[in-house]
Image (cartoon, rainbow, N blue to C red):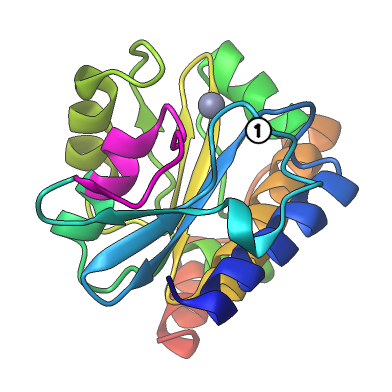
Amino acid sequence: MNEQLSQDLADVGRLLYEKRLTIASGGNMSVRAGNSMLITPSGVCKGMLSGRDMIEIDISSGEIIGKGKPSIETPFHLGIYRSRPDVNAVIHCHPVSCTVLAIQKKDLRTNLTPESLMILGKDVPMIPYDTPGSDGLAEKLIATMGPSKACLMQNHGALVVGKDLMDAFFRMETLEYIATLQLKCGEVPGLPEDEIERVLAMSK
Ligand SMILES: [Zn+2]
């Protein structure tokens, strides 16, 4: 197993837990390592992981290399790596403000600040609900997310992807920050359409 990437995964788990983006044993993260993905184990606090706890899974076959019990959400992590060659890291957790929006079935508004547009892109889709760990959830997530950088998961939480783990971590932190702003601001107008296009062009 790639020791550096395993350690990076443990470090990001600690950051997520310390920033209260995940609580108890919730959430799961993974990183691409060649033809494999390394993923966090099932049912463990993400603030207390070490690199040795990670589980390696072959991306094309889905077979576990070595031993351990991987996250229940392994199906959607594998699905993302199979369908998105641009993605090298996936973070899923249940931050409070994102989950409030996901329960209220309110879309995240990326037009409130330029930072949001630059880091999250214009569209943050809402993934229809399905049972955690099910193939149905994985199918809905991959079909609805498309090429987006982040999404909310109805009655569940949030998910982001990135070119590496820190890229994904910054996206999750920004996603929760924007969700919090949106809840605090109430009904307010967003940036005008021509400014949105200007900011999106800048971030390309
Ligand atoms: Zn979850």
Magenta-drawn stretch contains 181: no
Which residue lies under the disc numbered 1? 98
- Binning the other alpha carbons within 10 Å of mark 1 as few (below 14), some (14 to 19) or many (20 upward) gives many
Give the residue furthest to the left.
61
For residue 48, side relative to residue 168 (left or right) = right
Magenta-drawn stretch contains 64: yes
Amino acid type, residue under disc 1 in the picture: Cys
The correct choice, above or below, for 173 with respect to 194 in the image is above
For the C terminus, the quadrant is: bottom left
Say which residue appears at 66% left-offset and 29% top-offset.
26
Q: Which residues are magenta?
A: 63-78
| Residue 137 on image: x %, y % | 28, 23
Give the residue furthest to the front.
66
The correct choice, above or below, for 44 with respect to 171 in the image is above
> Can you see residue 92?
no
For residue 194, side relative to residue 20 (left or right) = left
The correct choice, above or below, for 166 with respect to 183 in the image is below
In this orientation, which residue lies closer to the viewer: 171 or 59? 59
For the N terminus, the quadrant is: bottom left
In this orientation, which residue lies closer to the viewer: 21 or 28? 28
Say which residue appears at 79% left-offset and 30% top-offset.
23
| Residue 197 on image: x %, y % | 42, 74
Say which residue appears at 85% left-offset and 34% top-offset.
184
